[in-house]
Amino acid sequence: MKLPRINELKVSSKRVLLRTNYDIPLKKKGNKIVDTTRIDESLPTIEYLLKNNAEVVIISHLGRPKGEIVPSLSLKPIAEYLGELLEQEIPLVTEIEKLSEQNESLVLLENLRFFKGEEDNDSEFALRLSQETDLFVNDAFACAHRSHASVVGLPRLLPTAFGFDFLKEIKTLSWLRKEAKRPLTIILGGIKKGKLAKVGSLARWADHLLIGGKLASLTDDDLPENVFKAELNPENKDIRLESVEEFGKIIKKSRTIVWVGPIGAFEEEQFSQGTKKLAELIVKTEAFTAIGGGDTEAALSKFGLEKKVNFISSGGGAMLEFLAEGTLPAIEALKKEND
């Protein structure tokens, strides 16, 4: 897939609006950052822009404040951490209209989801974001399946390209979608019901589709023949070990495994066994293994297995949608603008 790249833009002396994905876990006490991976992954794009004499306005979100100001979801800890990495102070701007008053080479706008227009894909909100900037760079792959103002609205207003992390994701997933070795197995877990909308298209692409976690309790029994759902324990917080064994028979024969979403409440020790045993089975295979989503990565990290998979995508939902459809709203918005 040919996409406009950041290094194809003339960024020197331009003000660049950069969409990143800083939706990261914070400790409840003190709002300390738990996992810096998503911030670290944005550095190549930020450093490229700064090195090439661009002024950068970073926009991102954290959590689900639903258009309200929630102090515990402020991007302040991220501004501080990013400032340490880049050895410069990064102002956190709370009002869009005050962005034009900033003279620093790099600033961060407060949580996009503090503004009601973001999730509503409000055109006026997108226009406010775009004012006083020259270019838009999208480096937030994990948000690319959302029809939000900062994802699909901005490409209609500014010359647009994709950042290095976004491009890396698309390159790997495009290869996976077209060249994956068979049999190919997809494992769906977690609690986000939206994943179920992709079951049909994913089942047509995959050889086997395994459903666990809370999703298994939300799935009806009218499923394609290659879709299997786990039996859950009485609390619906973990899959039964019998289901792990059944899934294991399929996993051992797979040459490609895609896993999005834990299959139990792994954060609680008494409900972590299903996810742990499944992860151990997966990493012991010789299959190409790709996982997606922050919770899946957190589960593997808890069990010390994160370095034993071949590819970790920053976005579970975006990963599934791209594998199912071959495109994403963020990409389609740019295509429409260029048509």
Image: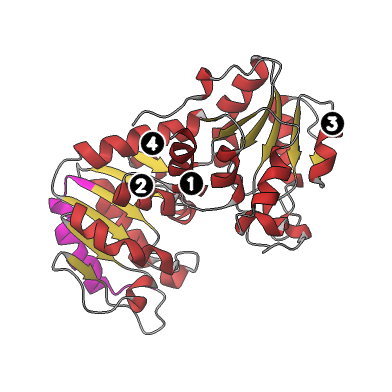
Q: Is residue 316 above or below residue 134?
A: below
- Mark 2 Cα within 10 Å, few/some/many (few <14, many 20+)? some
Marks 1 and 3, Cα distance to the nearest angstrom? 28 Å
Residue at 20% from the left image edge and 72% from the top image edge: 223
* Residue at mark 3: 102
Task: Give the labeled residue for mark 4.
Answer: 170
Question: Earlier along the polypeptide chain: callout 1 or callout 3?
Answer: 3
In which quarter of the view is residue 196 placed?
bottom left
Q: Which secondary structure lies at badge 4?
A: helix
Magenta region: which residues?
238-256
Residue contact between numbered discs 1 and 2, judged by CB atoms under 8 Å = yes
On the rendered image, what quadrant is the C terminus found in? top left
Q: Earlier in the sequence, mark 1 or mark 4?
A: 1
Residue at (36%, 44%) from the top-left corner?
327
What's the amino acid at mark 1?
A: Ala
Separation of residues labelled 1 and 2 (CA atoms): 9 Å
Q: Amino acid at mark 4?
A: Ile
Q: Mark 3 is on which residue type?
A: Gln
Earlier along the polypeptide chain: callout 3 or callout 2? 3
Viewer-closest of 30 and 45? 45
Rendered image: mark on residue 144: 1
Q: Are marks 3 and 2 in contact (CB under 8 Å)?
A: no
Q: Position of residue 282 (x, y in %)?
A: 26, 51
In the image, taking residue 233 as reference, residue 22 lies left or right, namely right
Q: Is residue 310 visible?
A: no
> Percent position (x, y) of residue 264?
40, 68
**With respect to residue 3, does 189 lie above or below?**
below
Mark toward the start of the polypeptide (1 vs 2): 1
